Image (tube, helix red, strand yellow):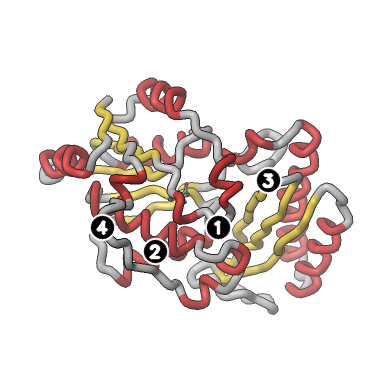
Amino acid sequence: MKLFHDVSSVRNFTQKRKNEQKIGLVPTMGALHPGHLALLEASQKDNDQTICSIYVNPTQFNNPDDLKKYPRTLEGDLELLEKIGCDAVFCPTDQIMYPPDQPQLLHLDFGYLNEILEGQHRPGHFDGVGLVVTKLLNIVQPHRAYFGQKDLQQLTIIRQLVREFFIPVEITSVPIVREASGLALSSRNQRLSPEEKETAIQLYQTLLFAQKQYKAGTDLSTITQQARNRLNQDSGIQLEYFEAVRVHDFQLLEERTENQPIAFCVAAYVGDVRLIDNVLIN
Ligand code: PAF
């Protein structure tokens, strides 16, 4: 497995192979878990070469404490990547991604997507995600890039970015991987105590409740209100939002829309760990 730290070496790797081989990129912030492995597996299946990037991107953390506490497990991550046969890893430093001797002037504004759900509760987050994903796609220049469905709004902004900037890459989304309890896998789960983990299961349970109600024909505003009430009743959960959205453009929905994919999305703190999850319908 090749390990790259700088822009020219990873770009050379891709450029040398690009004409004959398909290249897949799996961007991550490390602390790899089976959710990431599903992305890597999808890339390995679709492509001849898979590159995993590991970079904890400071510009997407609106909360400095969250950035400080974000798990960093590079050695274990590299061992795991080697074991599963990943072809190359790109681990840049902050100096490479945001050179301190060059002004970093650009900001990305995703319009209404910045004002709802994750955009609203994490000001500046999508600007940072958009910047780093654009940098990674331009550096590596893969044919395909893989992102998890757990970060559903992130997927929407990445698709928007690729479309508006005509970036020649195919974006592939990979379904959420869950623990047996239903808890969606996340690097942040490492920070939950066993009791908090028990509490966190409520998020998925409530999403399933909403999904069942939707299938039974209940109207959407009743469902979202009931779901919020359920979560607010649990003193271990501090709910940020529970909403229904139309998947293709992330418009918030108040009323049922038949024959269009919709998703229920939730974000909440359990202890001091912020968790998100969603389920798709239709
Ligand atoms: O989903 C993530 O892990 C991050 O937001 C990403 C896409 C790697 C950008 O830093």
Q: Which residue is mark 2?
A: 159
Q: Amino acid at mark 2?
A: Arg
Q: Earlier in the sequence, mark 3 or mark 1?
A: 1
Mark nearest the camera among 1 and 2 is: 1
Q: Closer to the camera: disc 3 or disc 1?
A: 1
> Could you say where residue 261 lies in the image, as x and y percent from the top left?
56, 66
Could you say where residue 5 lies in the image, as x and y percent from the top left?
27, 36
Q: Nearer the viewer, mark 3 or mark 2?
A: 3
Determine contact: label 1, label 4, CB under 8 Å: no
Q: Are marks 4 and 3 in contact (CB under 8 Å)?
A: no
First-in-chain label (4 vs 2): 4
Q: Quadrant of residue 47?
A: top left
Asked whether residue 282 is in view, the answer is no
Name the side, left or right, on which 180 lies relative to 88. Answer: right
Which residue shows up at 74% across the image and 37% down it?
197
User: How packed is label 2: few (under 14 Cα within 10 Å), some, or many (20 or more)?
Assistant: some
Residue 261 to residue 137: above or below? below
User: Which of disc 3 and disc 4 is earlier in sequence?
Assistant: 4
User: Counting residues from the N terminus, which is met first, the one under dot 3 or under dot 2?
Assistant: 2
Where is 35 relative to 264, above or below?
above
Q: CA distance from mark 4 to mark 2?
A: 28 Å
Tell me which residue sits at (68%, 45%) in the image: 273
Residue 164 position in % (x across, y down): 31, 72
Q: Which mark is residue 273?
A: 3
As drawn, the label of residue 123 is none
Q: Position of residue 27 (x, y in %)?
A: 38, 45
Q: Is residue 244 visible?
A: yes
Residue highlighted by disc 4: 102
Q: What is the secondary structure assignment of the residue under circle 3?
A: strand
Mark 4 vs mark 3, CA separation in Å:
34 Å
Residues 160 and 46: in front is 160
Residue of label 1: 62
